[in-house]
Image (spheres, grey):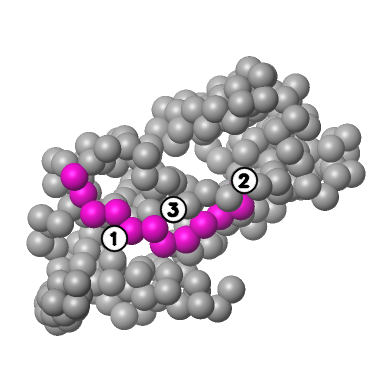
Amino acid sequence: MALSQLEEGAREVGAIGRSEAGHLQVGLFSCLASGFVSRLFAAYDDKHPNIDVSFYEGSAGHHLALINKSQLDIAFTIGNRQSHPYDAHELWREQVFAAIWDGHPLGDKTELNWGDLAHEVFLVRPGGPGDEVREYLSLRLNEIGRRPRFLIQSIGRYSLLGLVASRRGVAPMLASETTISIPGVIYRPITGEILPFFAIASPKNDNPAARTLLSLARTLSRSESSHP
């Protein structure tokens, strides 16, 4: 174990020295507005300003397919349920919230449960992360004997929250997304719903910039875990 850690450390130090310039292809589940990923890339840009980063939003399955084709260096995903041959590192966890309109009867509650939301219409986007959101909601509501009602909208996240404000439905959100301020929208946490997030990368990836990013992500994760 100690030898493998030393070897990993040596590879990371070597990668840092080789990454003055380069390019990264990064897969995300959600936006960079705030949260761990936002802090990570703020720190990474400070340390490696000459690394160009391209971001791609999509589902975990789509990201894994791109990693397999060497078209993605690293993906940040919710959970690690799909079978794959790549390295996966849990980095942080986030509370799940419900975005509801201001004046909604549930707004009087400080926390919600799935029973509270069982009769609501869920606003979701098609494809990519939207597929995972629908799967997640179906799983949770099926556990209490309910079947969710979805209203699929081919619009961006901000516009989706605009539909919440206009009382067309509610939307699940991550804690890092609740910094998005939309007039007429309020957020309520869903009791006990805390999701793990992972960084997934191929051990065969020889991009030095990817190694430095993963190294920094793990360092930031350890730092934030020790200072809740």
Front residue of 124/52: it is 124
Front residue of 219/107: it is 219
For discs 3 and 1, the disc positioned in front in the rendered view:
3
**Which residue is pictured at 72% across the width and 25% down the height?**
118
**Which residue is pictured at 42% across the width and 46% down the height?**
79
Q: Which amino acid, by three-letter code, is at mark 3?
A: Phe
Q: CA distance from mark 3 to mark 1?
A: 20 Å
Quarter occupied by residue 57: top left
* Residue range of the region highlighted in magenta in the rendering: 85-96
Q: Position of residue 143 (x, y in %)?
A: 61, 26
Q: Position of residue 99 (x, y in %)?
A: 70, 41
**Which residue is pictured at 38% across the width and 54% down the height?**
198
> Pointer 1: what residue?
53
> Pointer 2: what residue?
193
Q: Position of residue 140 (x, y in %)?
A: 59, 30
The vertical placement of 70 against 203, above or below, is above
Determine the main secondary structure of the stretch shown in magenta.
Answer: strand
The numbered disc on residue 197 is 3
Front residue of 210/91: it is 91
Residue 182 makes an appearance in the image: no
